[in-house]
Amino acid sequence: MSACEVCGEDVAELQACRQCGVRFCTECGYFNKHLCLDCGSIEEESQEEEAEDVLEESTQIEGEKTYGETPEQNEEIKSALK
């Protein structure tokens, strides 16, 4: 058994974080992503901010609100709303 570098518990299985290299247990990180809790939280925040930026950009075409997925759909829907 080895000790988790985050919580200090002796566990059967550890994983090394792909960002910082710390060895963590299943309770102290994301095994499927190979990230400790600290690095995983930073990555999630970054992804959320990026998703918000993409959403904001996708809802505007040259300063106008969009309604459809393509400019053609947008024009059709805007015309129907008039």
Image (spheres, rainbow, N blue to C red):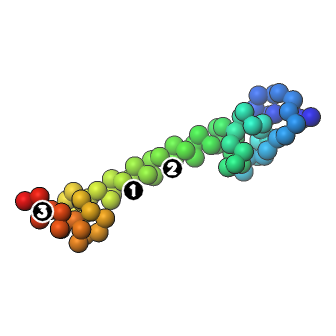
Amino acid type, mark 3:
Ala
Crowd tier of the residue under label 3, counting other residues whose Cα lies within 10 Å: few below 14, some 14–19, many 20 or above = few
Horizontal side of 9 relative to 28 (left or right) equals: right
Going from the N terminus, do you reach mark 2 or mark 3 first?
2
For disc 1, the marked residue is 54
| Res. 20 visible in picture | no
Looking at the rendered image, the quarter that the N terminus falls into is top right
| Res. 12 visible in picture | yes
Distance between the Cα atoms at labels 2 and 3? 35 Å
Q: Residue at x 77, y 41 (%)?
A: 22
Q: Residue at x 17, y 68 (%)?
A: 76
For disc 3, the marked residue is 80
Which of the two marks, 2 or 3, is nearer to us in this view? 3
For disc 2, the marked residue is 47
Crowd tier of the residue under label 1, counting other residues whose Cα lies within 10 Å: few below 14, some 14–19, many 20 or above = few
Q: Quadrant of residue 44?
A: top right
Counting labels gives 3
User: Disc 1 vs disc 2: Cβ atoms closer than 8 Å?
Assistant: no
Residue in the foreground of this view, choosing between 36 and 21: 36
Element type at marker 3? helix
Compared to residue 18, the image places residue 28 above or below, namely above
Residue 59, x across and y down, in percent: 29, 56
Q: Residue at x 87, y 29 (%)?
A: 10
Distance between the Cα atoms at labels 1 and 2? 10 Å
Amino acid type, mark 1:
Val
Compared to residue 79, the image places residue 19 above or below, namely above
Going from the N terminus, do you reach mark 1 or mark 3 first?
1
